[in-house]
Structures are given as C-alpha cells and as structure tokens.
Amino acid sequence: MPVRLTAAHSHSRPLPLPLLLTAALAATALTACGSGSGSSPDTIKVSYKQSTDNSVKVMDTYLAGIKKQFEHKYPGKKVEFVPIKAPDSEYYTKLQQMLRSPRTAPDLVYEDTFLINSDITSGYLKPLDPYLAKWPDWRRFIDTAKAAAQGQDGKTYGVPDGTDTRGLWFDKRVFEKAGLPLDWQPKTWDDVLAAARTIKRKVPGVIPLNVYTGKPAGERATMQGFEMLLYGTGDGTQDPLYDSGSKKWITGSQAFKDSLGFVETVYKEKLGPDVSDALDPNLNTTVNGELLPQGRLGIALDGSWLPYAWLPGSGHEWPDWSRRLGLAAMPTQHGQAPGKVSMSGGWTWSIPAKAANPDLAFDFVRTMQTKDNARKWYIANSGIAVREDVAADPKYVGAQPGIKFFTDLVASTHYRPAYPAYPKVSTAVQEAMEAVTTGDLSVEKAAGEYDATVKDVTGGQVVRG
C-alpha cells in the first residue's frame, strides 16, 4: 500500500461520542495497511493534523504544492497523505497509536514541540542528526527552534517549520463603543480586567474577554491561557513551572494560585464566554470564524497565527481585519519588568522510528524547507520564521500586518519545559482551570488538586515554589 504523511497545527472541542468513534474508526481504517510491511519503497506516507474547520485548507493546499514539486524532482516517487481531522488532543492520541507499530507508522509526522520529548522517550521517533549533518540549510535555523526539537540525549528529532508568539487581540469597534482607547496597551492584569468589565457594562451582547480554559481546549488552554499568566508573575528570569536547578516540577506557588485566580475572575464575573461555550473543544474555530470577524468579542488572548484563518481562500476571508483589530502585548501581573510576556511553541516534521522509508521522508522535508517554500508556509500559516534568511527577507516581513509585532515579541517570549512529563502536567493545569471556571472548586482547592496530581504523575519529582 502507498506511503502516507500526517500533520497538525499548533494553534490548537468535545465532539459527541458517536462522532468521535466514527472518526477513530475511519482513521484506523485509513492506516490499517500501514507503511511498514508490504508498502512500496517508492511511496512515502505523510501524516498531519487537518483543520476541523472544513473551510480552512491552508495546510492541505501547501502540502499539495510540495507533493507536486517532490514528485517532479524525484521521478517515480510518490507521496500519499493521511490527514487526521481531529481536535489537538485527539490528534496526539491517534498519532501515538499509529507510531507504535511498523504496520501503521507513517514515514513523516507533524509533531507539536510540547509532545516531542514524550514521543522521544517512548522510542517513537528517529534521530535526524545523520541527515542534518549533510544538509547545508540546517545552519540557517535559529538555535531556539533547534532546541525545541532536541531530546534530553542531545540528539535532534525534528525539523521545525516555524514558531509562534501570543498576545492580546482587541476589536476597535467594540472599544470605540465602550469608550476605551483605540491604542490600548495594558500595563497590568488589572488593566486587562478593567477593560473587560467596561465592555461588559457598556457593550451588551459582546463577550468581553476570551481566555481558553479546561481540558476540552487541551494545550490551547495551558499555553494560550494559563502560561501567558503564570510566566508573567515573576521577573522573567525563573521558570515558574519547572525548576531547572533541582530538575523538579514546582508546586504550591503563589504564582500558580494568582494565575488560577485570574481565570476564576473571568468566568465568575461573566467576562468570558458562557461556561458551556468555553468548554467546547471547537471554541477556537468559533472565535476565528465568527466572534472576531462579527465584532462579538472584545479581547482575545490568542496567538500570532490568527490571520491565516482570514486570508483569501481560507473560507473566512476577512480583508478588513487589520483595520478592525488592534494588537497589544500581554502585560506582566503588576507591570514589573520586562513589562510584557509571550509564550512560543511550534511544530516539527519528524520521522517515526518505525518508518518504512525514512531516507525518502527526509528528502520530502528538504523539499518543504527550501527558503522559498519555508517563506511560503510562514506567510500562508501566519507563522513566525525560524530560518534567519527568511526572517530577514522583505517579502516575509511585509507580507501581512502583525508580523513585525509578533516577531518582536520573540525577545520577551518563554518556552514550555517540554520534558517527558510535561503533557501530564499540562493536563493537570487544564483540570485546575476547568475546576475554577465551572466554580466546582475554589482556587485554593484546585491548586491543591494540581499539586497532588503533579506529584503523582512525576513520581514525586516536585519542589515547593
């Protein structure tokens, strides 16, 4: 059977159980014959995360163009795609199931950097160092992006295809109605909450502020929501989640409780979406495709990639977005230095340890990652360049509004401690957020549950904050 490829987008909804089962069975059927035994040595199988929004075909369109180039460059070779159409958490689960067996493992997969060390530790991925040593373009990649794809053994297990930053998007139409400044640049968390309260009071029918929360949102809740708060609590020099000195996870910190307190305030004061909507795993599709374009959301704590949903051909074309929306950096808790905070992540292309055609798969990566193709992807995906030559390219810098703003945030950004235990710690964060969002637990009790869970999932590798 031909080889297929699998991918996803970091910019990370509960589906009814019958639909989940149908999706799982369909994905299983697609991969049942696998790329291992009996597959053609001339065909590669590439797997990626397909958008759950049927109108957004950015990744599909881009990969179709690369396939055409690749098959032209390597006559007789074929590329087959196995897209996995699922929310982030479902994608990760399905991908890991595929990676376990040579019968189902694709030849190339799209890995979120937050999960890559977990998959490395599980033995699912192949180190790429022998390939990278012979690939001149590898020296063009920035060091922080390379580090995001490294295992604790120092080897590299993925080629990054961009990074991202996060900040506050705000609707100038809503701000004008609320009497708020159109050049809004909040200095503290209280400034953000004050603006949301003003919108609630003066612009009825508009959601004042969206902060992703809870398990259905997965890593989107942890990273776009909680960590954008947590990493703005100190002075920016110490990681508030993981203590690198003792190599232990931090529990019992006031910073954690303060961050949970912000989330609790948003939902207790009804400054965010209705709780049922906030816990819908497809909320991000609604935010991107409806709430922001229709002027029904005042402030969104979200990522640099949002414009990719509004570009021509996206299905949600919104040419006026740069005039309608303003951008502000997320402030630190009390306005303390450095004054603003961002989180960065990204995705990498990785070769499974059980891939049938790894050499050919890396040839596909090299085709994707020429300067021109990389630039094309960053622009199409509203991504932040991780190749120095593309970052300096005027065609990239001037491609669309907002690129400079979000690229400049790299100087204030933080990266998740993506060690093998991180996915389980992240889930514990989501559970704590969900508990205060629904009002089921107080901040104190939710933080205590988090501490107990982290101690359990890390085998007691915790230190008091």
Image (spheres, helix red, strand yellow):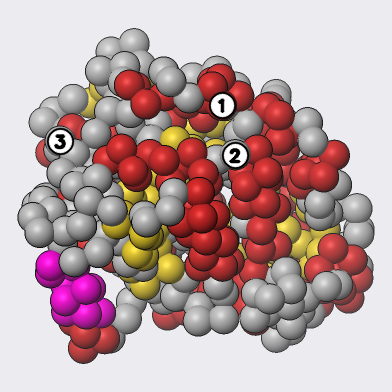
| Closer to the camera in the image, 29 or 80 | 80
Q: Main secondary structure of the magenta part?
A: helix
Magenta stretch: residue 22 in it? no
Element marked by disc 3? loop
The residue singled out by tag 3 in the image is 123
In this picture, is 145 found above or below 238?
Answer: below
Are dots 3 and 2 in contact, CB under 8 Å?
A: no
Instruction: Give me the residue at 33% from left, 21% from top.
Output: 130
The disc placed on residue 370 is 2
Magenta stretch: residue 28 in it? yes
Mark 3 or mark 2, which has the lower sequence index? 3
Instruction: Give me the residue at 22% from left, 51% from top.
Output: 41
The residue singled out by tag 1 in the image is 137
Q: Is residue 443 visible?
A: no
* Residue 394 x, y percent position in the rendering: 85, 39
Are dots 2 and 1 in contact, CB under 8 Å?
A: yes
* Residue 58 x, y percent position in the rendering: 58, 66
| Closer to the camera in the image, 336 or 24 | 24
In this picture, is 163 found above or below 336?
Answer: below
Query: Badge 2: few (under 14), some or many (20 or more) residues near its Cα, within 10 Å?
Result: few
Q: In this picture, which residue range is highlighted in magenta?
A: 23-33
Q: CA distance from mark 3 to mark 1?
A: 27 Å
